[in-house]
């Protein structure tokens, strides 16, 4: 009986350890395009996008090729609403049906979140066709 309990404990320990390791690995991804789940994503530009989901709130950050954090989400996205990130040409597009769309242009020296409004039409030149419909709703 003691051996069964010990073996069960060891089995559960390994399940917990290996399930937590999964969150730290870089996911198989093409290096650009759509992100719809938590995890680590290495871009084809050398950046790493880290997406977390804690208590139903999505947060994200972007690290450059030397590991320095260059983007940190300030606004929390509900995981219960439609959301996604989209990486293209060193721009992180953020779509959230509850807080609205935005983007981070990492091609600029002054990296900041640009919330998309009718008064901010400059994003139209940069917007990828694959996500255009969501951003122009």
Image (cartoon, grey):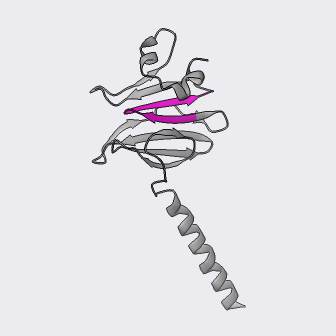
Report the front residue among 5 and 32: 32
Q: Quick check: is 86 in the magenta stretch?
A: yes
Query: In terms of secondary structure, what is the magenta stretch mainly?
Result: strand
User: Which quarter shows the C terminus?
Assistant: top right
Q: Is residue 112 left or right of residue 102?
A: left
Residue lying at 43% horizontally and 44% vertically, measured from the top left: 31
Residue 20 in the image: state x and y as whole percent.
53, 62
Magenta range is: 84-97
Residue 132 in the image: state x and y as whole percent.
55, 23
User: Which quarter shows the N terminus?
Assistant: bottom right
133, above or below 58, in the image: above
Residue lying at 60% horizontally and 80% vertically, measured from the top left: 10
Q: Is residue 137 left or right of residue 110?
A: right
Residue 19 in the image: state x and y as whole percent.
57, 64
Report the front residue among 43 and 63: 43
Report the front residue among 28 and 103: 28
């Amino acid at each position: 009986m003691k051996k069964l309990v010990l073996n069960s404990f060891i089995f559960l320990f390994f399940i917990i350890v290996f399930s937590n390791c999964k969150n730290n690995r870089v996911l198989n991804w093409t290096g650009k395009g759509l992100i719809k789940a938590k995890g680590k994503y290495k871009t084809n530009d050398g950046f790493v996008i880290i997406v977390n989901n804690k208590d139903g709130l999505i947060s994200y950050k972007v690290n450059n090729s030397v590991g320095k954090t260059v983007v940190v989400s300030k606004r929390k996205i509900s995981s219960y609403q439609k959301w996604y990130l989209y990486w293209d040409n060193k721009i992180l597009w953020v779509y959230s049906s509850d807080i609205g769309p935005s983007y981070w242009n990492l091609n600029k020296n002054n990296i900041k979140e640009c919330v998309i409004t009718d008064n901010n039409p400059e994003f139209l030149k940069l917007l990828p066709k694959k996500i255009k419909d969501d951003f122009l709703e």
